[in-house]
Amino acid sequence: MRKNPVLYAVRKLLVFLLSVWLLSLLVFCMARLSPGDPLSAYYGERLEKMSVAEKQQARQRLGLDKPLLEQYGIWLKNALKGDFGISYKYKQPVMEVISQRLGNTLLLGGLGFMFTFGGALGLGLLCAWYEDRWPDRLLCRLGTLTSCVPEFWLSMVLILVFCVLLRWLPSSGAYTVGGSGGAGDRIVHLILPMAVVLAGHLWYYAYMVRNRLLEEVRADYVLMGRATGLSRRCLLLRHCLPNSLPAYFSLMAISVPHVLGGTYIVETVFSYPGLGALSFESARYADYNMLMVLCVITGAVVILCSMAAQGINQRIDPRMRAGQGEVAEL
């Protein structure tokens, strides 16, 4: 029997909402129990001149004097209305600050994700075609080497070489301060951050794609295809590659936290004005409202991508549909 699509969608939606709610509760409690005083971010140096009574009044105005669960209830109620509070550091509504940085993260992370998996598929096919020959061995060794290098360390090395010694590229920012901020200027500022994102992920996922393709190459149907006279190119591109796509999409879903975390690290090191640098600032200055929204957005993206990839796999691979109780039509 086939599943009811409406019930399936409702169940997935409930799982998504429950996951996001649990994430928000966990982040809320961890943020407020961790060291740091949000008054320092809000008042800055003026906090040192404030009396104990004035600090207490400030906490009352910001709603920080209430019990923890009561604070969470107030935040959740306002969040459901679209009010996520103000940033203690920037003195602006949280969503206004995020909207100013979101485009930069989408540009760096989105391009990095597409280049990573587009390149990983191409390199994986190349390695599978030249299995156990010098291109395959070279790419595998490069992948092992680059995947072991920490992204923050590689970022510092690139800054030292290309920004300090050679002075070819800018070391920080998304555009030149006071400049026009045109496409050329943005591309120049993207070169080093993008290079680190690709170096930290491209070879690793290319190696995984290669291994999955080689599993298909060694399958029985490939041996039968060779016996009937099909070329290696035809078998690899028309049979092995399509059969590897479900695993490829699953790999993309699993990699979202990995690539996103790498993007956040790169933004922090290069002072790139995106959500990663903003998350670091929020945690550093105990900007609770900002940190909450950033963590929930990031977590929701990860959960949503994983669920979407699972749904795509079920559509592509008949074996998964059969495992879910559907009758595979052969």
Image: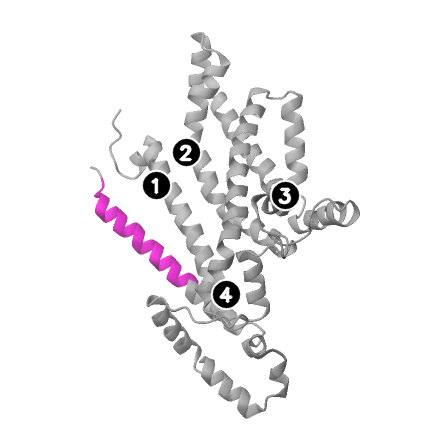
Name the foreground residue: 222 vs 231: 231
Three-letter amino acid code of the residue under disc 4: Leu
- In the rendered view, tell whether residue 101 sits above or below residue 157: below
Q: In this view, does 257 lie to the left or right of 158?
A: left
- The one of 53 and 254 positioned closer to us in this rendering: 53
**Along the polypeptide, which appears first: circle 3 or circle 4?**
3
Earlier sequence position, callout 4 versus callout 2: 2
Residue linked to disc 1: 311
Tag of residue 291? 4
Q: Do the residues labelled 2 and 3 touch (CB within 8 Å)?
A: no
In the structure shown, which secondary structural element does the residue marked by tag 2 occupy?
A: helix
16 falls in the magenta region: yes
Nearer the observer: mark 3 or 4; the answer is 3
Specify the segment rendered in magenta: 3-23
Mark 1 nearby-residue class (10 Å; few <14, some 14–19, many ≥20): some
Q: Which residue is at the far right? A: 165
